[in-house]
Amino acid sequence: MFSNRYIYIYATVLVVFSALILTLAAVGLKPYQDKNIRVEKMQQLLGAVGLESDANNAEELFNTYFKEQHAVNSKGEIVGTLIDGKQTIGTINPFTIDTKKQMALVKANDPSASLPVFVYEKDGKKTYVVPVIGNGLWGGIWGNIAFADDLNTIVGVNFDHKGETPGLGAEIATPFFEDQFKGKTIFDGADFKSVEVKKAADKSSPHQVDAISGGTITSNGVSDMLNNSLKFYIPYFNSLKK
Amino acid sequence: MAEINFKLIKNPLSKENPITVQVLGICSALAVTAKLEPAVVMSISVTVVIIMANLIISLLRKTIPSRIRIIVQLVIVSLLVILVDQVLKAFVYDVSKQLSVFVGLIITNCIVMGRLEAFAMSNKPFDSMLDGLGNGLGYAIILIVVGFVRELFGSGTLWDYPVIPQAFYDMGYQNNSLMIMPPMALILVGLIIWIQRSRNKELCEK
């Protein structure tokens, strides 16, 4: 039989020792984990403009083509700019913006909210990539939308999700669904129309794409996500068009 | 040099299989077997955790006060699982995303706690490691079989490489989406249990 004193000391030593090991592991592995998260984000942005990349070349490709990054607020003003990895305007780093957190601020009409715009440039032609974020059936869905320099025509999208149903809602992250968005437009004249995901969509309409059968709630989630997230960028897009 | 007791490795593979006979750790077996790769990574993770936990608990077994032994076991298991989770996040990020919460849930995997209570608390370190290895492999073999079947018929791939020729699809073959859904894992595990019991009558309850 062990005394109470022994039990207390035993438990304390065990817990402190475990905590120590975990701290060391967490600190030691953090740079690798951060790199993975950064590379994943770059891969998603590259995917939106149709560039395939893997974990090894994503960083290089990203740095070559995405030289210009902005953080914009709801009035369409630039509050932070990163050019070639250097902060040239403001203090907000567009790449590290927590989109989820900022989108919550946008919903609460907080004027301090700012969201990133990533500018892809190849052969002198600019493509503007913006993140979108929303909810599917089981959890979050998100993606990136790439616009041509008319800031109206979608040239590419990519979506991802936390845990939509495989074979149904999860199909939003497949090329078969994503490719439908190419060539769609979000404005009708000066009016914002977004792109709607609906059943039996009129394929000739520039604002509609086909929903996924059996994935209605996820499909509606994509519609809402596009509408809510892209709305924020209208003032910025308008300021660029002038 | 301790003699290797092969029964400790062999039995969990067949007549004491943690999944099909003891029906432990079923939850994760259903969740991570839609594809082969996460199933294999999960199997390796669980095996490593059981072996290490069995070893540590067995080394400490004479010092652990029995009144707090479950807590001590939990602390050790949690420590190992968090380490595994951190390592996966750092080096196989894609897979760790697919496994998501299930790595963390190894902590509650009954196989781990079950082996600690039933074996490591009363056996020598080396035997405990073998027991952990055996049970880990017993868990792994079921996960890999289920993952193999589900990926092959559910996605037409193995380890993400397409294996079903395009000609089949042209003739009207389709991937079976039911295979990717969790219920199919349950049905497959059920089939494995059925086959195993029909071949080994000792396992049948009266």
Image (tube, helix red, strand yellow):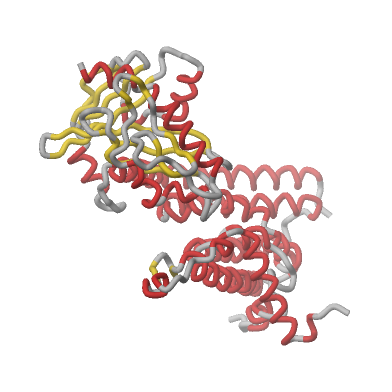
Instruction: Write the residue at 49% across / 23% down.
Output: A104
Asked whether residue A23 appears in the rendered view, the answer is yes
Instruction: Write the residue at 70% across / 47% down.
Output: A10
Q: Position of residue B8 (x, y in %)?
A: 67, 78
Q: Position of residue A48 (x, y in %)?
A: 31, 42
- Residue B183 occupies quadrant: bottom right
Instruction: Write the residue at 49% across / 66% down.
Output: B175
Q: Quadrant of the C terminus of chain A?
A: top left
- Please state which of residues A195 and A64 is positioned toward the viewer in this rendering: A195
Q: Is residue A162 above or below residue A186?
A: below
Residue pushed farthest right? B206
- Residue A41 occupies quadrant: top left
Residue pushed farthest left? A123
Q: Quadrant of the N terminus of chain A?
A: bottom right
- Please state which of residues A83 and A215 is positioned toward the viewer in this rendering: A215
Q: Position of residue A180 (x, y in %)?
A: 36, 45
- Please state which of residues A114 and B155 is positioned toward the viewer in this rendering: B155
Asked whether residue B40 appears in the rendered view, the answer is no
Q: Is residue A174 above or below residue B8?
A: above
Instruction: Write the residue at 70% across / 45% down.
Output: A11
Q: Does B150 sit left or right of A127 as displayed?
A: right
Q: Position of residue B162 (x, y in %)?
A: 39, 69
Q: Is residue A14 above or below residue A106?
A: below
Q: Does A146 sit left or right of B105 as displayed?
A: left
- Please state which of residues A146 and A204 is positioned toward the viewer in this rendering: A204
How many numbered discs? 0
